Image: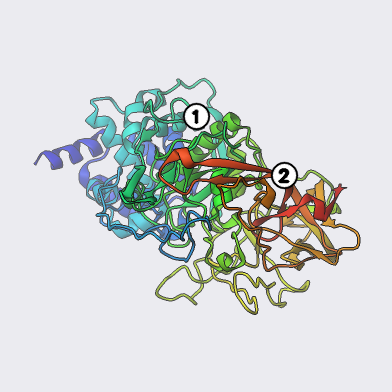
Amino acid sequence: MRRRTLVAAIVALAGLGTGQAHAAQQTGPVPTTRQQAFADAAKAYHVPEKLLLAVSYLESRWDANQGRPSVGAGYGPMHLTDGTLTSSGEHFSGGGEDPRGDTARPALRPKATAAASAARPGGQTLQEVAELTGAGVSALRTDATANIKGGAALLARYQHDLGKPLGADPAAWYQATVRYGGSAWFAGQVYDVMRTGESRTTDDGQRVTLAATPGIKSAGAGVDDPETECPPGLGCEWVPAPYQQLDPADPTSYGNHDLGDRPKSQRIRYIVIHDTEGDWATTLKLAQDPTYLAWHYTVRSDDGHIAQHVKTKDVGWHAGNWDINARSIGIEHEGFLAQGGSWYTEAMYRSSAALVRYLTKKYDIPVDRAHILGHDNVPGITPPNVQGMHEDPGPYWDWAHYFALLGHPLHATAGPRSGMVTILPDYDKNVVPYTGCDASAPSAPCPPHGGGSIMLRTAPSADAPLVKDIGKHPPNGDATMSVYDHSARAATGQTYAVADRQGDWTAIWYLGQKAWFYNPKRQPTAVGAHGLVVAPKPGAASVPIYGRAYPEAEAYPANIPAQSLVPMQYTFAAGQSYAVADTVRGEYDYSTTFDVSTHAIVRGELRYYEIQFGHRVYFVKTGDVVLKRVS
């Protein structure tokens, strides 16, 4: 009875009776634009229009996403959540990668302990809105206009629950916004969006604008756990990963990370962006499993909430390459590369970007795509490891948008005929016909969706075969259009040396071959860049490349086994050149037992260049190549 009374009160406050509200949704005029849908919903439920627009922007950037759910089981522009949907999985369940990536120890292939799905922060707002408005669940999932009205009704209900009047002043709706989004940080971002304004064309071609309101009253911020390392107000919580010896008789049997003293012991050079391939509850369960593996942070899809598991001074086991692990911070993002992975929420992007801005400043990490890596950009450590390396966060992660949020928007740094290019397609217009998004039908086309990667071919023609990757697909290297197969792709923000041009096609040097991509002037997929490239030194037919930058054998003390420098299976031949991202000193973090007194950092005289060799970065010895500036 109380529930029915509350529903009646909400629609009455909105100026409609229960029956009238339902009838208006069923028989009223259908808005012709997304913009008008927000205006009509705000008016119907007495919600400030700018607030409604800003909440929706944080949830979905106003996209409809073809009625498909986000990883947080949210639908439509208002991200109405269906709590009856569950998802599970684990990050390392799909490949043969050893997440620690250290050949000095036996390969680590942990098995996840099953975790029961927990209630999501947003609960079942889809069902709640269906009861509140009378709209069907199916319509709320697939009809953007009904979804927006439902979100407005839900905000009005939250405002009513708080005993506050419905009105036009957005500042009076702060607590209702906290409840809608799940956190004070989310609400703060909503008010930031209202202050700055936004405008964009949605995934279904709708132009939506939120005019800036610079003087709007400031909102609150999240409360940070004092154990966390986060920018103030982000509201991070401390969910520690246990550092435990698993077998008292075996000091090498421990998990799930290594204690360190970074950056004093070793500079932090990289941040690695992952997706979890599992839901929030499962992911946090895994991070707290001493027999599994650990990373530094996890970001939740619904509201951008962040949990920290490992101190940044310590070394997480996450990248599948021990050299990268020892020099990086790993950030997992709740999501799936393909199963809904095309819909990463704006709240997640913004929260993650706020964290990365803080970390890059604190540790002086360059803000570029050679140091802010996807897990799919991390090199294999030796030839046999390449095939099992992971490919998250995948082609649907919007690197251009992410770097804009980092305050370092990607752009041309040289003219269109430069000897280097940075990959920069228009994400929304760059629809690549991937396959494999449906596990039950792996050869079926994925639903059309924008993306940040371009396909690479053996000749300047759309009919030419894809370039080959003999590491990913031995022995012949034949690539596929699977969304999980990065082997013939270049991603937004990556910079390559130009190998050739013909008409609307550009070739880059990629895995030892010319790789062609369509790059028309009217809609370019790459822009000019300047910087440094390397080529084999004169007289060398080819030079080796490496998946890790380890010291020379002479640098190791007698009590630490020298790690072998194993060349990869690719050929870097004379006449080719590759973009240089950094100069790296050969180092090795010797951490093979639970006893930290046995740990040491081995430093050598050997220097390497980090290069963009394929989809992944690799290393070449500085003495094997010559350095040239390109503009």
Q: Is residue 571 above or below residue 332?
A: below
Residue 228 falls in image quadrant? top left
Q: Which mark is residue 192?
A: 1
Disc 2 and disc 1: Cα gap in Å?
35 Å
Q: Residue furthest left?
A: 1
Query: Residue shown at 72%/71% (left/top)?
Result: 457
Q: Nearer the viewer, residue 218 or 547?
A: 547
Mark count: 2
Residue that label 2 marks: 582
Query: Could you tell me if residue 619 is visible in this image?
Result: yes
Q: Residue furthest right?
A: 538
Indicate the quadrant containing the N terminus: top left, top right, bottom left or bottom right.
top left
Q: Nearer the viewer, residue 294 or 564?
A: 564
Where residue 177 appears, x then y in whole percent? 36, 33
Where residue 180 appears, x then y in whole percent? 33, 37
Where residue 64 appears, x then y in whole percent? 46, 54
**Horizontal arrangement in the rendering, residue 497 relative to residue 134 (left or right):** right
> For the residue labelled by badge 1, is the local secondary structure a helix, a strand or a loop?
helix
